[in-house]
Image (cartoon, helix red, strand yellow):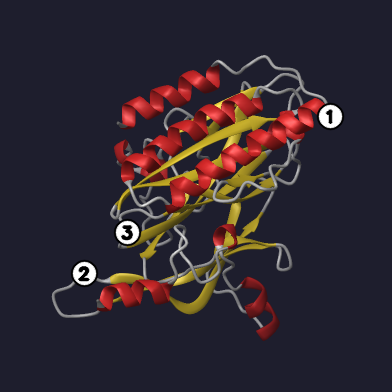
Amino acid sequence: MRFIFSSALMLLFFCSFGQRSKITFSANEKNQLSALEDTLSFFAYSIVNDSLPEDRFYATRELIVTLVKTLKIKNSFYYPFSKLQSVSLQYPPDSSFRMFTWQLAVSPSEYRYYGALQKKSDSLILFPLIDRSFTISQPDVASLSPENWMGCLVYGIQQFGVGDSATYLAFGYDANDGKTRKKWIDPIRFVRNKPVFGAPLFPPNPKDSSATIPLRFILSYSAESTIKLNYDAELGLIVFDHLAPLVLKAGQPEEMVPDGSYEAFKILPNKLEYIEMLTVTSTDEESIRQKPILGREGKDLFGKSSLEKKKKGNN
């Protein structure tokens, strides 16, 4: 099933090259784009909310087909898709490209991610993002391509540098196995106009002098917790929760949870500088508090609240 969907995604996306784009839309283009956006919204909602796995797979396939059809329309890069919920659409500050990403629940303990990176161009330049995370044994040191992507829901993109030398930092969320979740920073560079994921921007482990320089930053934490990992414009830093082990019962594996303190990265010209302990005021605390992904405050990515989960668990 993974191979079928990955192959279909690559075939459909690569067949979409060569379209022209302009900033303005004709009345016919606006109507067509709006109608297709409604269709995309329906399938995106079904992927998140339908209770039957086969229906979620069907909606995923139809979303891919419809998205490609939509992006073939000239000027598509400038269409905002403001009605499209459940699919994360993120731009870097320079708006040189954008990323569509979404999540499919294969089962309560298995998740797959789908996406596309569309570059801003007179002709359509579109890269399918194929989730191969289940085959990547050392994700923190792997240099990856769009065809070999660490699948995630991208919820923000920051950058440093401009033009051809620019590096972008994609902030991603992975529901992982349902018991633990992951968030990470995945650097993106463009080499010969093609995205490459991963770059040696992060400092090595200070406690291990022989450690390999990581190409991405990964936090793994308990699914019962919520953590912060994002760029904070007010502080001018990438802020994240410090995680500490929590042992619930003897014999059970420890879980990583936030302990109320924060760490940070400062963006320098060619690297990220680690700040071990971030001193915050009460005003800063409110600023860096975690905001919900896709606007689902109090709910998970499938629209279920923690209260609903507790009720279900007590039945």
Q: Earlier in the sequence, mark 1 or mark 2?
A: 1
Residue 177 appears left or right of 129: left
Q: Which residue appears at 66% of the width and 54% of the height?
A: 267
Q: Which mark is residue 178?
A: 3
Indicate the position of residue 220 as horizontal and vertical percent values: 38, 60
Residue at 59% from the left image edge and 50% from the top image edge: 85
Please state which amino acid type lies under the numbered disc 1. Answer: Ala
Along the line of sight, the residue nearer the viewer: 152 or 63: 63
Q: Of circles 1 and 3, which is in front?
A: 1
Residue 114: give x, y in percent of width and height: 46, 38
Locate residue 150 relative to residue 277 in the image: left or right: left
Q: Is residue 70 visible?
A: yes
Q: Mark 3 or mark 2: name the one nearer the start of the chain.
A: 3
Mark seen at residue 27: 1
Q: Quadrant of residue 238?
A: bottom right
Q: Nearer the viewer, residue 234 or 200?
A: 234
As helix, strand or loop, the secondary structure at mark 2 comes to: loop
Identify the element where label 1 is drawn: helix
